[in-house]
Image (cartoon, coloured by chain):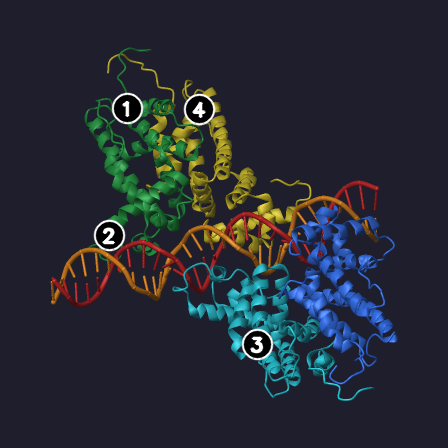
Chain colours: A cyan, B blue, C yellow, D green, E red, F orange
Amino acid sequence: MSPEQSRRSEKARQAIIEAAFAICAELGFTATTIEAVAARAGVGKATIYRWWPSKAAILLEGVEARRDAAVGYPDTGDVMADLATQAANVMQLFDSEFGTIWRGLVAAAQTEDVAAEGVRRILRDSIDECVARLAKARDEGQIRRDLDLELVVALVHGPIHQTWLLGTRPVHPAFVRAVLQALKPSLQTPPACHEAGT
Amino acid sequence: MSPEQSRRSEKARQAIIEAAFAICAELGFTATTIEAVAARAGVGKATIYRWWPSKAAILLEGVEARRDAAVGYPDTGDVMADLATQAANVMQLFDSEFGTIWRGLVAAAQTEDVAAEGVRRILRDSIDECVARLAKARDEGQIRRDLDLELVVALVHGPIHQTWLLGTRPVHPAFVRAVLQALKPSLQTPPACHEAGT
Amino acid sequence: MSPEQSRRSEKARQAIIEAAFAICAELGFTATTIEAVAARAGVGKATIYRWWPSKAAILLEGVEARRDAAVGYPDTGDVMADLATQAANVMQLFDSEFGTIWRGLVAAAQTEDVAAEGVRRILRDSIDECVARLAKARDEGQIRRDLDLELVVALVHGPIHQTWLLGTRPVHPAFVRAVLQALKPSLQTPPACHEAGT
Amino acid sequence: MSPEQSRRSEKARQAIIEAAFAICAELGFTATTIEAVAARAGVGKATIYRWWPSKAAILLEGVEARRDAAVGYPDTGDVMADLATQAANVMQLFDSEFGTIWRGLVAAAQTEDVAAEGVRRILRDSIDECVARLAKARDEGQIRRDLDLELVVALVHGPIHQTWLLGTRPVHPAFVRAVLQALKPSLQTPPACHEAGT
DNA sequence: TACTAATCGAGACGGTACGTCCAGTCTTGGG
DNA sequence: CCCAAGACTGGACGTACCGTCTCGATTAGTA
């Protein structure tokens, strides 16, 4: 984003992002070439290269712009249930064309620094959101006080996201629930023993 | 691997895999083109295309061949410690050029079916190995009897591998230990309460 | 023409030259882009760049190949008439699409060394041919013995070619004859004076 | 030059022409792009396109403006010597950066009508000047009365200019003199025969 | 002297072609 | 029949310019 933003054409910017999303959704990340995006957006290639360093950066900008429409955490009073709900919602979102886009971004992040930074930026927001929900739950006494909340985020989303990314098994809502169920002892305040013996 | 294997040149096969590894380690996955591999291996491009469908397949074959030299699980009698040791060893391995190769394979797996299958095949082996170690620990009473062991593998390696892949934070041995420590209540047989209030 | 000629595809070579000629004839030298030639010839651009440094070089090769079909000098016994005939024939040839191609080559020769050399090579042949005809005429006593024949070529063709190139006036056969007519005293052996006085 | 001239910035006009000359002299005609000229002149591209149809038109305007400083014909009383002197001076001028510019204009004239007209306009002036000198010589009886003077201009300058343009041989003063020397019999009034034999 | 309309600089825009790189296929000659 | 070598078609790359356009900021001529 080197040149001044002032003279930039908002119309072109949106057309490019929308074209990139459409092509990626329809034909996949590999077919999402700068050339195809330019053609579909009715835009010169130079206009893309002027403002974005790679196709991943375009998709990244689109994803970040849609963050408001992102999947938030409900607050029913039961954190474990809320975490499960949100994770299941994310997985459902990933079943749509958005999954293709996110896979592409993760792939790009493995070899491009710009993409890696963008992906981290997005994840940072997601983590912060999750941490906020967990902090509330901690204040309510639903989870242990001594937990590193960012670590908890990793414990919860790591297994789910990883399983989805690497396809080691299908990620259905039941799997999400199983993960959360298994993690309960690690997260929840251990119940006091009221009776001695057994 | 369509044609007959009998006529195949073992020398060429090894040279190709080694060249692919070397280029990927030195110049990265993106620069690991079939053309470059052929040149470095002193091999015709057709020879590569005859036996492998993509560059990811070459690296995959190399990785699978090196599985014997892979990171196994120690058995000190303490599963949690052993899991931590193995995970830390893997992370150390990923700090080397092998990390670059694995990142490339994961990236390829997001868009190519062949790569995805290959990655899953490798992960399956790793999971099985881990499950075996966990089964032993379960038999020894170190972990709960009611656990789905494959789920446990996800719980343990998901957070670690995911954090490494997406770079959301540095993955040092301390982080690995923290993950395992946090997971203890979920995995271990809950201690009987001997006294009220503990 | 860097790589070995042996593996070169003769079919591609001819298709490229013919495409370049056709496009130049139909659409002009400016529209004769490498891209258009490749498309018309059904050839990859790389194949063109592998063997020719510029579009001028392609046309040049075509022109040199067609030299056999070139405009030669008749030998009726009258040099001046023969020179006029040949020059008029050349001008007629230049009225066809070949004129467009030659103009393009001359233009390219003003800014590109490769084109300049090629044009000079072609002109050298033409000059030699003309010199040969002149030498014969000189031996027959039709033109002065003391003339530098290459200079004569310049005297004859310079005015004609130059007038055509720069378009300072239309170059009809009458003009060609006028040039030759005016040059007669300079070329022909001066008649001896048979009578003293006036 | 469509819009009103009154509002035109004389400063910009001169800066553009000077920039075009400078770039053409330093980097050649090919590198003389509108973009480069605009940048060097510190001028918007639109300002150039508003007043000139092409880069050749800019150089043309500069060349025409410098015509006063052009190479005129001396009048020593000996036409042949004067023609040789002027031609030699032109060739010397062409050895400078002006030669590069003129070559560029001739090249452009092969494919662009505007350039062709401009070149013809300039040549017309040169021809007229030469014709004027020849007319004077004719009135003085130095050259034949029956000559078409414009044809004479072609006979004199055609060989020289053509040889320079196409580079068929180096154009030194000696060459210029040789051309004029060879043309003498065609131009000069034939001397009466005073004695037989001679 | 203030108004106002055209020109100015700057540079983004949609395009076209550039010359390069690589994919994946095909051809040639040698073992 | 496999191999090394590498030319082939094809397509995307990222760049350079083209000629058009839209922006304030001058800057002339007019009121």
Q: Which of disc 1 and disc 2 is earlier in sequence? A: 2
Label 4–label 1 contact, CB within 8 A: no
- The amino acid at mark 4 is Leu
Marks 2/1: CA–CA distance? 46 Å
Marks 4/3: CA–CA distance? 93 Å
In the rendered image, residue A80, in percent from the top left (x then y), is placed at 66, 83
- The amino acid at mark 3 is Glu
Q: Which residue is mark 2?
A: D9
In the rendered image, residue F31, in percent from the top left (x then y), is placed at 11, 67
- The amino acid at mark 2 is Ser
In the rendered image, residue F15, in percent from the top left (x then y), is placed at 49, 52
Kindly report which numbered mark, 2 or 3, lies closer to the viewer in this rendering.
3
Callout 4: chain = C
Callout 1: chain = D
Residue B67's image quarter? bottom right
Instruction: Determine the secondary structure under disc 1.
Output: helix
Asked whether the residues under marks 2 and 1 belong to the same chain, the reply is yes
| Drawn side of residue C27 relative to residue B196, left or right | left
**How crowded is the residue under tag 3: few (<14 C-alpha within 10 Å), some, or many (20+)?**
some
For the residue pair C26 and B171, the one nearer the viewer reads as B171
For the residue pair A153 and C90, the one nearer the viewer reads as A153
Q: Which residue is mark 1?
A: D80
Instruction: Determine the secondary structure under disc 3.
Output: helix
For residue A129, which numbered disc appears in the image?
A: 3
Quadrant placement of the C terminus of chain A: bottom right
Marks 4/2: CA–CA distance? 55 Å
Kindly report which numbered mark, 4 or 3, lies closer to the viewer in this rendering.
3
Position above or below: B5 against A148: above
For residue C149, which numbered disc appears in the image?
A: 4
